[in-house]
Each structure stands twice: as C-alpha cells, then as structure tokens.
Image (cartoon, rainbow, N blue to C red):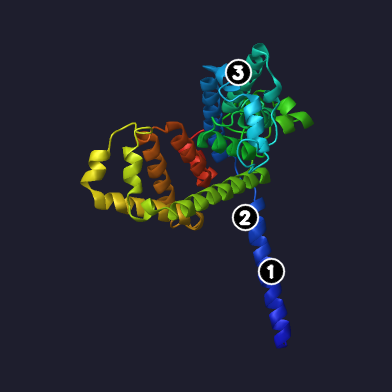
C-alpha cells in the first residue's frame, strides 16, 4: 500500500470516528429521568413566579401598570434609550380589560401547574413557554435572571419527553395501555424508553449553560473588584440583597475573601471546559451548588440560586437519577 493510500485510509477512519462521536453526542437515545426532575422544579418555579405576579397583577400588566405599554413600546423602539434589540411584541400590550387579564393569568397558572405535575406535557410545556414569552416581553423593567433561566429551560424541555416519567402522564399510560398504544396515545403519552429527543434537549441545555457561565466569567474578569478580591465583600455588604449578615466573617478573613473571588472567576470562566470530563465534573457541580447556594442563602436571591442549581442537574446521568429516586 502506497503512502498516499495510507494517508487517505487514515483520514477516512478519522472522519468516521469523528462523525460517530458527533452523532453519539447529539443523537444517542437517552432516558428522560433527569429532565423529568428538572421539569418538576421548573414547573414549580414558574407557578411560583405567576402566583407572585397575581398578588398585584394590575401593577405589572394592567393599563396603568408601573411601566405602561406606551413606555415599553418607546423603550423597544429606541424612543427613550438607543434601541439595542427588537424584542418583538406581546399581545398583553393590547389588553386593557382587568377581567381578561385575570382570566389569562389564571390560565397561565393552570398550565404552569400542569407542567409541574406532568399532565399533558406534550401540550402544556410548549403552551407554558409561549405564555411565559408573552409575559417576558410585557414585563420590561421587572424581569430577573430567574425569569430568563426558567424560560430557557422550558424552551428545551418542550423538545423532550420529560413527562414520560414522574408525571401524571406516566400514570395515565399505565392505567390506559390500550389508548396509549394508539397513534395519539403514543404522541401524547410517550414511553419512558430512551429517546433521541431527550438527548437533544439535554445537550442544548448543557451548551446554553456553558455559554452563560463563560460570558459571566469573562464579564467578571473585566472588573477590578474580582481581581483585587473585594467583589465578595461588596456582595456581602450590599444591604439591598443581604439576607444574612456575613460581613464580620469576610472582614475577619480578607485572604479567604480574595481567594474565593478568584476561585469564582476561574470556575465560571472554565466551567465550559471542566464540566465535561468525568474526573472534574463532580468538583465543578459541587462548586455550582456552593456558589448558587451561597447566593440563595446570603444574598436574598433564593429563587435564582435554586433555579441555577436545577439547571446544573442536566449534567447528572439519568441512570444515576433513576437509581437515586429508586422508583418510577
């Protein structure tokens, strides 16, 4: 065999291996158990946010809201500040009737509860995502990182079969096997067998999460407070977010404060590389629990810290989750 033939054969083999690895990364069938746990948590958090909105709904989306539709429209069109994005429109801008707004919000809370318990998830999850988008476009000025992460997770969960286990749908499938075997039954009540859709949804969430952390770490690296180690002090001393006063601890151990600031920047920046190897993944996920758990406990952002921990669950193997839960 000539040298050129050897090179061609080696190139073909390398291309086949690379293509096989690519296909396995994206399209290898995967169990739904991890995504099902995340669906429960995301649905519960979504329901919670809409219950909070319901405590003063008209102040958020009513015709005389804190930010009325005219102000938001000018903001999006660049009339108040330079336009930086076309957010599109929400039909909530055009609803003035309090009764209709309350009916719409009641529907949104019902759909959120359906996602949480896993009822008609093939329909309720995309519907919940669509309704959430309408609120996202309407609630300019009142949005929080929690809303963005919940919307992102919903967008990918609706592609999966996250309702095929730990859900009312799974119970219905066991109770009505005859109907579940029909065409509509297979579509609305999918089985808990490994599916390519679960893998695609998992990879999209993982890559999106890596992108969030990468740019978050790069943004922190631009600030002097993260380099001189004072960022943790300013976070702990900010009375607007402070839920537990730990300034005495931070002030007593300045070296530890500085070290934790540097470790946070390193972890966030290199999360996208270190979370994939099995050797470093447990340490990176443990760090995620510590960072976001600290945000939840000490900085008053319980919901945001919790939903970020939920998002990191996507790196847990569904087989591990199934063994951990112990039942389906």
Q: Please tell me whether mark 2 or mark 3 is closer to you in this view.
A: 3
> What's the distance in space between the residues labelled 2 and 1, CA to CA?
15 Å
| Mark number displayed over residue 15 | 1
> Is residue 215 or residue 124 the one in the foreground?
215
Q: Secondary structure at mark 3?
A: loop
Residue displayed at 49% across by 44% down: 312
Name the residue carrying label 2.
25
Q: Are marks 2 and 1 in contact (CB under 8 Å)?
A: no
Say left or right for 132 vs 225: right
The quadrant where residue 35 appears:
top right
What is the quadrant of the N terminus in the image? Answer: bottom right
Residue 201: give x, y in percent of width and height: 63, 44
Query: Is residue 3 depicted above or below 288 in this figure?
Result: below
The quadrant where residue 296 appears:
top left
Residue displayed at 65% across by 36% down: 79
Query: Is residue 276 depicted above or below 81 in this figure?
Result: below
């Amino acid at each position: 065999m000539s040298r050129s033939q050897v090179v061609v054969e080696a190139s073909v083999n390398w291309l086949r291996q690379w293509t096989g690895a690519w296909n396995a990364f994206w399209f290898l069938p995967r169990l739904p158990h991890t995504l099902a746990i995340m669906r429960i948590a995301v649905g519960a958090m979504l329901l919670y946010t809409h219950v909070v909105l319901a405590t003063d709904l008209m102040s958020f989306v009513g015709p005389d809201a804190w930010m009325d539709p005219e102000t938001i429209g000018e903001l999006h069109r660049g009339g108040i500040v330079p336009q930086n994005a076309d957010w599109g429109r929400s039909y909530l801008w055009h609803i003035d009737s309090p009764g209709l707004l309350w009916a719409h919000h009641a529907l949104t809370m019902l759909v959120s509860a359906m996602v949480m318990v896993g009822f008609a998830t093939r329909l309720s999850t995309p519907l919940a995502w669509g309704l959430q988008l309408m609120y996202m476009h309407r609630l300019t000025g009142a949005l929080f990182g929690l809303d963005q992460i919940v919307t992102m997770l919903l967008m990918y969960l609706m592609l999966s079969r996250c309702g095929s286990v730990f859900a009312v749908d799974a119970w219905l499938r066991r109770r009505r096997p005859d109907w579940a075997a029909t065409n509509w039954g297979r579509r609305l009540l999918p089985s808990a067998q490994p599916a390519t859709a679960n893998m695609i949804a998992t990879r999209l969430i993982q890559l999106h999460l890596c992108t969030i952390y990468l740019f978050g770490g790069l943004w922190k690296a631009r600030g002097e407070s993260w380099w001189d180690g004072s960022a943790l002090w300013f976070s702990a001393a900010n009375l607007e977010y402070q839920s537990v006063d730990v300034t005495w601890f931070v002030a007593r151990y300045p070296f530890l404060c500085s070290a934790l600031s540097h470790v946070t920047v390193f972890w966030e920046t290199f999360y996208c590389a270190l979370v994939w190897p099995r050797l470093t993944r447990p340490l990176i996920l443990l760090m995620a629990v510590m960072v976001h758990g600290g945000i939840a406990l000490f900085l008053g952002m319980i919901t945001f810290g919790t939903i970020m921990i939920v998002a990191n669950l996507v790196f847990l193997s569904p087989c591990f989750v199934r063994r951990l839960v112990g039942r389906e």
